[in-house]
Structures are given as structure tokens and as C-alpha cells.
Image (cartoon, grey):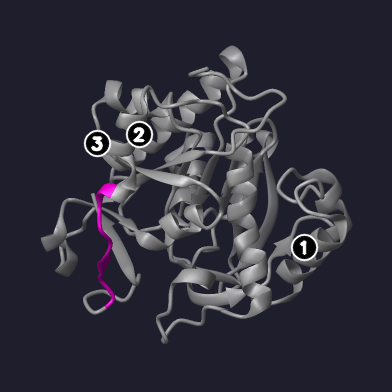
Amino acid sequence: MEGKSMKNNMNNRPVIGILAQPTLTGKISIYGKYYIDAAYVKFVESSGARVVPLRFDLPRDEMRSYFDQLNGILFAGGGVDLVEKNGDLTPYMKSQQMLVNWAIEAYEKNGDYMPMWGTCLGFQGLAIALANDSSVMQSGFDSENMAIPLDFTMPESKIIESTRLFNPKEVDSVQMRDIVYLLGNKNVTFNAHHDGIPIDRWISNSNLNKQVRLISTNLDRNGRKYASLLEHSKYPIYGSQFHPEKSMFEWNPNEVINHSLESVKVNSYFGKFFINECRKNSHTFKSEQFLEKSLIYQFTPVYTYPLVNDFEQCYFV
């Protein structure tokens, strides 16, 4: 049934929306106005779902129609601004805020379960949206090209007991303990950001401090602490300041991305967890024909690494 959530059954054909970003002026702008880093598409597809690209400036009614047909939404990393110099939200961030608000409203109104995941920029956007305050994001972090373990905010055993993200129901308890151990002790999370959510801003914002579970933090090279992994205490909203997708799908030799078996194991887990959350949503597309026209299969990825070294391939949608 369109617009309702699964109660007892799982939707094993989930379709995920990825919010496309404006193509910034530069070498790849010749390919189109909107782009999605192909690594995020692979991240979703390798976890068992299909992708629909969402242009960030779609008319409100059209965006709402997609929202009511999708099973989850991913907010990718990237370089678009989220906040104007005067503190107002940019058009892209307004779209992310709107989608987050819809997910919360749908859950409160009829229990509609719309999972969301944000990575890096997407994580920062989730924090802004959930805080309802753009000033929680600050610049000046020295966290580019850095692979580190997570600094969990609670003991590893408590992480497994107290979070949905690391609930052993998702995998067997032995595997989960291994995943949490590796995340907390090995350099498996890749950071590539100069903006972030400082801990003092998190603590001082009651929406974040009281309603969002901060699972881990990290320090930049100057010892400045930032939020690095979150889940909302009530809604299926999750995010990482680090990049899970890069371990599997990005190959810039100048970046210290950990491509080891251990790193691939733990980073791919986040995709599998998120998509399994999306299986709990029973939204369906209004027709198979409309779904086919909407899927990212309508577009061909472009090998962009020779032009920009941030990603191997992009979809221009």
C-alpha cells in the first residue's frame, strides 16, 4: 500500500532516492547541472536496493510524490554549500530540511517509516535539520585525507546493547562484536572534511543533545572534537561524518583510504544496515513504467577522475 510502512513483512525490492547536488563551476560542469557521485549508487546497489536520482530543486509537489513512493533517502557527501554567509539555508539544504521534516511528520502522523542516511556533507545537513539551527555546523576542521578509528561515546558492549545501528539482530553477535571492535581500534573510517559539528555546539543544542544519539566522536589533527556517527533516538535517521563508500569504490592513490578486507567488511556493513532499514518501508511506485523511467539506469556514469580527483565516476542527472 502506497504511503504505509511494513509491520510484519519486509519489502525486498527497496528503491532509494539520492539527492543530486548542483554541479559546481569547474571542469565537470560541462556534463550537466546535477550530479551524484557514482560511489553512493554502488553503495546502495551492492547492499540490495535500486536508486532514483532526485534533483534538489524539483518542484515541491514532484518531490513529495517521489517521497511517497521511495523506501529511503540518502544524502551524499560533496562540496555544495549548506549555509549562506548570512546564516540562511542554501536551496540544497532547504531541500534536505524539507525531506527530513516530511519523514518526521509522516512517522508522527501514521507511523510511516522512512529511513534516511547522511554521509559527510549529508551528515552535516542532517545535524542542521535535526537541530533546526544552521550554526551547529562550523568550519576550520583539519580532517582532510585522514583514516582513523572511531572514539565511541560508550563502551563497546554498551554500543551493541543501546543502539539500533549496531543491534546484533542485523548480523550474528560474533560478527557485530568484530565490527564494533574494528571500528573502535583500526584506521577504517576515512574523513575528508573541513566543516563539522563541534561537540560544544552539539551539547548546547537541546534538539541534538536530547533527541539524537551521538554514537562516536573524533579529533581532527589539531585536537578539535567533532561528531562522527549518529542515530536519532526515535526516527530511522542515521549519519556518518566519515565516508563508508570510499573503502569499496574510490581509488585516488593520494588518499589514505583503507581498502583492506577489514575496512571493506565494516564499511559495507553500514550500507547493508541502511538498506535493511529501508526494507521496513512499504511505499510502492504508482506504476512499474514510472519506476523504470525514474531509475538511475536511465543515465550512464562518466569517468570523471581524469578531471577531478574527488571521485572515480559521476552520474549527471
Q: Is residue 315 visible?
A: yes
Which of label 2 and label 1 is nearer to you?
Answer: 2
Q: Is residue 199 visible?
A: no
Q: Residue drawn 53% across and 45% down?
A: 117
Q: Is residue 293 above or below residue 266?
A: above
Q: Position of residue 76 (x, y in %)?
A: 42, 53
> What residue is disc 2 on?
291
Q: Residue drawn 68% across and 30% down?
A: 234
Element on which disc 1 rests: helix
Does 301 lie within the magenta span? yes
Residue 308: give its label: none
> What residue is disc 3 on?
57
- Distance in Å between CA atoms under marks 2 and 3: 20 Å
> What residue is disc 1 on?
180
Residue farthest to the bottom?
Answer: 253
Q: Which span is picked out in magenta?
A: 298-305
Number of residues whose C-alpha sits closer than 10 Å to that of mark 1, classed few (under 14), some (14–19) or many (20 or more): some
Say which quarter of the image contains residue 270: bottom right
Residue farthest to the left?
Answer: 30
Does 28 lie within the magenta span? no
Which of pointers 2 and 3 lies earlier in the amino acid sequence? 3
Contact, CB < 8 Å: mark 3 with mark 1?
A: no
Which of pointers 2 and 1 lies earlier in the amino acid sequence? 1
Report the amino acid beneath label 2.
Leu
Q: Residue drawn 80% across and 67% down?
A: 178
